[in-house]
Image: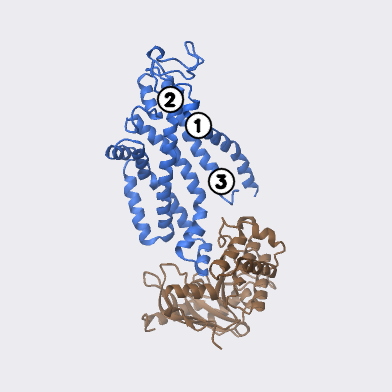
Chain colours: A blue, B brown
Amino acid sequence: MDEARISRRGLGPRLWLAGGWLVLALLAAIFAPLVAPQDPLAQDLMLERLPPFWLDGAEPGYWLGTDSLGRDLLSRLIFGGRIAFIVAFAAATSACLLGSALGLIAGYFGGWADRIISRVVDIWMAFPPVLFAILLVAVLGTGLSSVILAIAIIDWTRFCRVIRAEAMSQARMDYVESARIAGYGRIGIMLREVLPNVLPSVVALLSLEMGIAVIVEAILSFVNLSISTDDPTWGSIIAEGRLSIHQAWWVLVFPLITLILTVLSFSQFGEALKARFDPVLR
Amino acid sequence: MEPCLDIRRLSAVLPNGQRVLRSVSLAVQPGEVRALVGESGAGKTMIGKAVLGVLPKSVRVVEGDMLVEGEDLGHLDAKARRTLIGARTALIPQDPLTALNPSRRIGAQMTDRLVRILGWSGERADTRIRQLLDEVQIRDPERVLKSYPHELSGGMRQRVLIAAAFAAEPRLIVADEPTTALDVTVQKQILRLIAQLQRDHGTAILFVTHDLGVVAKISQKVSVLYAGKVVEEAETARLFAAPQHPYTRALIAATPRYTDPYASLKPVDESVLAGLAAEIAAADKDWRPGHG
């Protein structure tokens, strides 16, 4: 009991910091047109490579400076967040649903179902994920929906593996056997008895996967394979920033910080949520 | 009188052909407690699992019949067998730690079965559960019903499981070493509770244990199992007074006694084990599935 309480108290700041950043970034992304100080696409060569506000030569209204085409960096980051979050939620949720469902079936039913699903997972994981993503987007064509689809197609295996292992260990528990004896059907037991016990892991993984989706999207943008090149995304900003790193370091550094904070927050938030969901730790 | 559980010449094998049950026959009369005693690996839990239809996938029943209140389980399709087992039998499991779903409240777990499987109204199930919790001497049912399993002690969880087992008035309960995972003082209380509820409800119990002390306290009849074979079966009092089989005698002699706590433990004698091995070999020699 005491142990549980200590760990819960320890989770407090982590949950708040991670959740706080995510809420802030999400709100900014949702209300981007209202929040962004400038038009993210407006170019002004008179204002190119303005430094962030605390350095000499900064212009008011351009808080984080501008890139080599004179576009406001903060506004671009805020608008880029829209795509990052859409991809994070849509891709991670799809991967989660597909992977968890297959993992639950493989882990609980075992036998043939497990053998088939596990072999498919093994084969899937033999592909290097980033190359696989690039290949998929190249085949599917660029655009938001193909990016989401590509991430879901690649990353469902993460869920499948973990949930399979968890479902397997739960399926061996006596309470599952008792439910069998009482006369519950197999699918009923899977959904009513096993699923609630693997849910904390599903939640933690889902949040982690959102972070991963953000990274993958950034990578695809970086190699120019994501959304159309006009819309700012964190990956494409980083790609541009790389070219002018010696003249304007901020164009590379700020999107990187944003990306790292977001990914880190997703994973920390997931861990904290898992602890909240778990009745033994609650 | 028709036995509540009748097992006839039940044999089961592992995938490598090794027999784990060797033509086991035993009957449990209505309202009777039949102890099934043997060392670990003797197959006593396996018999309970076979009756309840939850044998591990690797174990295959190759011959024999199991009748619950005269109905041959082998003649029923899977669904009918589930329904019969669900309605007329229950299990008191060995380990109260893993026998309750950790993510559901006790109350929901207990009533769920009555409502979903047996079609009781929620109100009736709730009343029944409270009545049973009272019978297993749980003083604060409100708190217990709202608790998650990890919030209760092992003894409390085992009480909950006993209450759950008796809730639907099964004709037969398989008690699979229900006191083994508990500490000694709690064991005694739990044993007394099971005996009390068994008498009050007139339920037949197949009581699996390795503890002869428990056998003496709770059962009317005993089957002694060795390597999946029933080597002796008798009324409990008679078994202790005049054990027939050398193995039974050795087991009784090996039981530690409170009256002589400093006596060294007596292992089962080599000659007894050799005799058993010969007996098993003889039983296996001319055994063929289906012709045994």
Outermost residue on the left side: it is: A139
Front: mark 3 or 2: 2
Q: Where the C terminus of chain B falls, by quadrant?
A: bottom left
User: Given contact means CB atoms under 8 Å apart, are the residues at marks 3 and 2 in contact?
Assistant: no
Of residue B19 and residue A84, the one placed in the foreground of this image is A84
Distance (Cα) linking label 3 and label 2: 35 Å
Residue under label 2 = A76
Percent x, y of residue A200: 52, 49
Residue at image point 60% right, 61% down:
B108
Residue under the point 39% across and 29% down: A233
Residue count near mark 1 (Cα–Cα under 10 Å), binned few <14, some 14–19, many ≥20? many
| Residue A255 relative to residue B130: left or right | left
Q: Of the numbered discs in the image, which one, if any, rests on residue A275?
A: 3
State how far apart marks 1 and 2 are (Cα).
13 Å
Q: Do pointers 3 and 1 mark residues of a single chain?
A: yes
Residue at the bottom extreme of this rendering: B1
Q: Is residue B59 above or below residue A41?
A: below
Please provide percent x and percent y for residue B174: 55, 73
Q: Percent from the top left, x then y, of residue B68?
A: 51, 80
Q: Nearer the viewer, residue B250 or B20?
A: B20
Which label is found at residue A25?
A: 1
Which chain is disc 3 placed on? Answer: A
Point out the tag, 1 or 2, that comes first from the N-terminus: 1
Q: Chain of mark 1?
A: A
Dot 3 or dot 1, earlier in sequence: 1
Occupied quadrant, residue B165: bottom right
Q: Which mark, by number, is residue A186?
A: none
On the picture, is A54 further left or further right than B215? left
Provide residue B234's location: percent of width, then percent of height: 57, 84
